[in-house]
Every structure is written in C-alpha cells, then in structure tokens.
Amino acid sequence: GKPKGGVTYQRQLPKFLQQHAHLLQREGGQDDSKKAWEDYGHSDELAKYGDEDDIAGNARKGLGSNPGSIQQPGTVSDVEERERKQEMAKVEKGKGNRAFSEKRYEDAIRSFTRCIELDPDDKVFYSNRSAAHAATKDFEAALEDGEAAVRLAKDWVKGHIRVGAASMGLKRYTDARESYERALKLDEDNDQIKASLKEAAEKEEQSIKSGTIVFAAKRKRDEDGKKSAVGAGKKVKNKTLLSFNEEEDE
C-alpha cells in the first residue's frame, strides 16, 4: 500500500550503478539507466556474484574487477586456458605414471616433459621425471629435475629425496647425505629416508677414508671420456625411493 504519514521512499542505486548516476540527468540517459536498473533488480545471475568488491566472483563471470565494466581481454580466457592445460597435464601424468610402472622409462620421460610444458609450476611433474631419468641412469638430468622440484616447494619432502637419489647416482655422497637430512627433518618417521641417509653417510665416510671424493666438475670430465665404455655396466639396484607413491597419483 501507499506509505502512511506522508513518508516517501527514495530508491537507492546499487553500488555498481552509482558511478553512472550522472547519466540520469542527461537527455536520453534515462532509458539506459532504467534498463541497467531492471537488469540488476531482476537478474539472479548478476545479484548472486556480489558487489564491486567481489573481485574473484566477478572474474568468474568475466566482469573484471568492476562488475559495471565491460569484460576486458585476457581475464577469463587466461583462467580457462590455464585450467584446460592443467587438466591435459593430469591426463598426461597418468600416462607417464603407467609407463614408469611398466618400465617404459623413455615414454615416461616424454609424458612428464609434456606435463611440464603444459603446467610448469607443478612440482610433482619434475619429481616424477627425475625418477624416470634416474631409472635410465641419467643422474645429471635427474638432479636438475629434483632441484627444480625443491625450488618450487622447499618444504616438500619428495623433492629432497629426488636430489638425494640423483646425488647418490653421481657418487656425490655429501650432497646426498645433506639432501636426505633435509628430507628426514620434513618426515621424521620415514624408514626409507633413514635407510637412504645411513647409506649416504656410510658411502661418504668410505670416500673420505679412501680419498676418492669426486667433485662435480671432475666427475663430469671423467664421465665424458667413459661414455663409450658404459654400455655393458652392472644393473643398478632399484631404490624404493625412486618409485611413485599415492601422493603423486592424486
């Protein structure tokens, strides 16, 4: 009914229309403002995303940081493209994990490389590729990927494990011991890490006593001269820490 006592009510513009209030005074502006008001008042789709302070909600609808503005290029399309690539990377990771479990290590490396191309900020992809490189005895590449995983997540135990395993393969026992020590600080009850740390410490002590500690640069030169004779070397015993776990299959 009509308001009693001569009281009148004034309709207040919503926040996203207040910046356009001056248009109400312009000739021909009333129709545009009325249409905007009706869109606001009758559109549940717009109202549920909140006001101009709801930046995240507006981005989801392609409204940018200001719901009264026209969608700017490079907002939703970037988000959607990133999400699309992340989903593709998950599919490729599944292929890589399967290839690794079937000991098709080169296929696994290719899959994880594709994962990294699609989503270069996911530590798991570098970790998995590090394990695959280690399985092919390419410990330099395994080390690079392990270090990349650590750079992305310093508090992630698996990255330090990958660096430790690669360092063991390169006979850099001091580096391996230090990496396993860091890993154990992050996962104090992990028996596999304890065993690997013990092995690295023993190897380090032996190399010190025998004077056979080899620095990275010297080892690289030695390996370059021996590559042609490596073909029929002994098989490296599988390390449990090279395999994937449930965390990486999520």
Image (cartoon, rainbow, N blue to C red):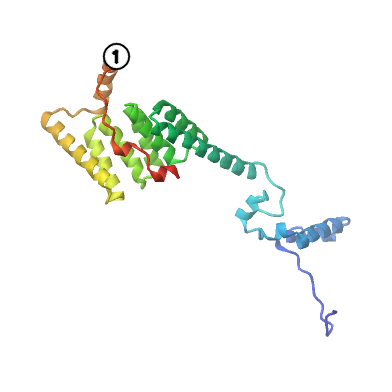
Question: In front here: 184 or 190?
Answer: 190
**Residue 30 vertical position relative to residue 114 in the rendered view, above or below:** below
- Is 31 drawn above or below residue 167 in the view shown? below
Q: How many marks?
A: 1
Q: Quarter of the image holding residue 196?
A: top left
In the picture provided, is 7 more to the left or to the right than 123? Answer: right
In the rendered view, tell whether residue 45 sits above or below residue 164: below
Which residue is outermost to the top?
Answer: 228
Q: Which residue does the image show at 57% across and 42% down from the upper left?
A: 83
Query: Relative to residue 166, is residue 3 drawn left or right?
Result: right
Q: Which residue is mark 1?
A: 228
Q: Amino acid at mark 1?
A: Ser
Residue 106 image-quadrant placement:
top left
> Residue 20: x percent and y percent?
76, 58
Residue 219: image location, x then y, percent: 25, 24
**Quarter containing the N terminus:** bottom right
Can the viewer see residue 21? Answer: no
Residue extending furthest toward the front? 102
- Quarter of the figure with the C terminus: top left
Residue 249 in view, yes or no? yes
Q: Nearer the viewer, residue 215 or 93?
A: 93
Say few, some or many: other residues with alpha carbon within 10 Å of mark 1 (under 14 / 14 to 19 / 20 or more): few
What residue lies at 11% left-to-right and 32% top-to-bottom? 209
Q: Residue furthest right?
A: 27
SS type, badge 1: helix
Can you give x and y, in whole percent of width and height, for residue 133 in the image?
A: 36, 29
Q: Nearer the viewer, residue 167 or 32?
A: 167
Q: Would you say 96 lies left or right of 184 here?
A: right
Q: Residue furthest left?
A: 209
Quadrant assignment, res 138? top left
Residue drawn at x 61%, y 43% as measured from the top left: 80
Tell me where residue 241 appears, x and y as whole percent: 31, 39
